[in-house]
Amino acid sequence: MANLPYDKHSAASIFEYSKGLLGKSLRAFVREDYLPKKGKGSIGQMVENLYFLLETNNNPEADFSSANMELKCTPLKLAKNNDYLIKERLVCNMINYCDVVNEDFEHSHFYLKCQLMLLLFYLYKKEHDNLDLEFIFSVLWKLPEKDLLIIRQDYQTIIEKIKRGEAHLLSEGDTMYLGACRKGQKGDSLMTQPFSDEGAPRRAFSLKMAYMRTILQYVLDSKENAVTNFAFPKEQLVTEEELTKHSFDEILLKRFASYIGKDYRDIAAQRGVDLSHNPKNKFAMIANAIAATDKCANINRSEEFIKAGLTMKTIRIQKNGSIKEAMSFENIDYIEVAECDDWFDSRLYELFSSRFMFVVFKEQHEGKEDYVLDDIFFWTMPQSDLRWAENYWNHIKENILANHISEEYWWKGKDKKKFHVRPKAQKSKDLAPTINGGYAKKFCYWFNNDYVRNIIDNRLQEINGK
């Protein structure tokens, strides 16, 4: 179309024009002769057609190819307190297992399309026509150079797994910012992969929900509904210079290497950690002091961990090899669980399929609590255990929908089902909102201590097998 109301060669002009969509729905732009699109991705297509006056095509180039900019429409949810929440990861492009192994990162479809994106956030409302959904924010966003270094490492991790004939074993927990997310429904035909006869589920390159959440937070902090010149005001754990020489994992592992085998009290003294009041989280404080190297106060709140959805957890092994404590996670959001229709879109799937950095302390003499730093490793939940987690989530959801929010209904540690539900503090009086407008006691997600023991056993087998 010759007479576009913006300069198609200018990202700035396109961004400026996008502001006219904010506070409105596509209904305001529908032409009488226009046949609305249906299904996943239909909103993006209709924005192209109705607002930007572009024809839909299957061209692998960016949507605004003359400006080297991709258009992405992504949904938000509205919480009970009227806060905006990210609804899902940002799907970038499908992975063709046979083709992608022949593409280096700089020539990949993802890199060529997604270096610069116009992100249009709209408010999702269940059972509303897509033409009536309101657009809230517009973000002209260029991938920061430092993020690109980590994303490049993520891309290579995915490609190497495919080259090993393990496309069927891909997991979003394999990587930091760029994920290989599942696409399609259960029962869909599997795709061919080049180095194995085993079929692999359909997957797409995507920016993870944790990463998208940081973008949304930046927009909210700006107090503007149209934002450009994207930057993250977070504490940084590693530098861009470090990432040009080593992977993120290598940098972190190296920081711990010289402390392996040392008593935790000696490490605390060396790293300036005050243990005089015997804090309950002293092992996490010590691990944080090693990993952060004075760069940030809490490693789990660093830029890299937030964007990756990466979590550091400490594990203590007693002299007899047992693990006394189960591993706790966040409180269950009863409304989020009840309103989520798909396990793969749930907060628990995001949480359990993300990467973990485990820091292990081991007791040297029984009952002496003379723990030394024994190991550090990155871990992703196996697909077989994620299937257990799906059953766990479904059981939680069934009870929430039935308003059965009580100890008697949840999976318990003694059930030996890998995961269980209980409060973090038994005497906690905090309450959380429920779907019926009431409030219930707060419960949270837990790994059983025997499941944590299994993680350690598998790690030891991995080490001894090298």
Image (tube, rainbow, N blue to C red):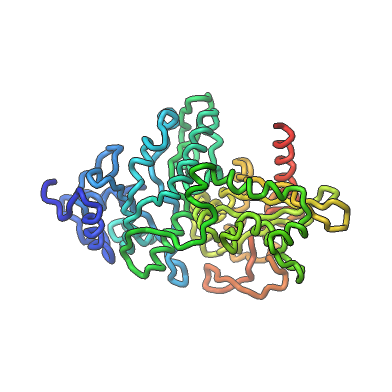
Residue at position x 53%, y 25% from top? 196
The reply, left or right, for residue 357 in relation to residue 3 is right
The reply, left or right, for residue 24 in relation to residue 433 is left
Residue at position x 33%, y 43% from top? 113
Residue 303 picture location, percent across and down: 50, 57
Residue at position x 30%, y 50% from top? 71
Residue 374 picture location, percent across and down: 75, 48
User: Which corner quadrant of the image does residue 377 belong to?
Assistant: top right
Residue at position x 74%, y 61% from top? 269
Q: Is residue 209 above or below residue 97?
A: below
Residue 147 picture location, percent across and down: 45, 49
Residue 296 visible to the viewer: yes
User: Which corner quadrant of the image does residue 232 belong to?
Assistant: bottom left
- Total marks shown come to 0
Closer to the camera in the image, 213 or 141: 141
Residue 185 visible to the viewer: no
Residue extending farthest to the left is: 3
Residue extending farthest to the bottom is: 429
Closer to the camera in the image, 247 or 176: 247
Q: Is residue 442 above or below residue 116?
A: below
The C terminus, quarter of image: top right
Residue 138 picture location, percent across and down: 31, 60
Closer to the camera in the image, 181 or 404: 181
Q: Is residue 273 above or below residue 343?
A: below
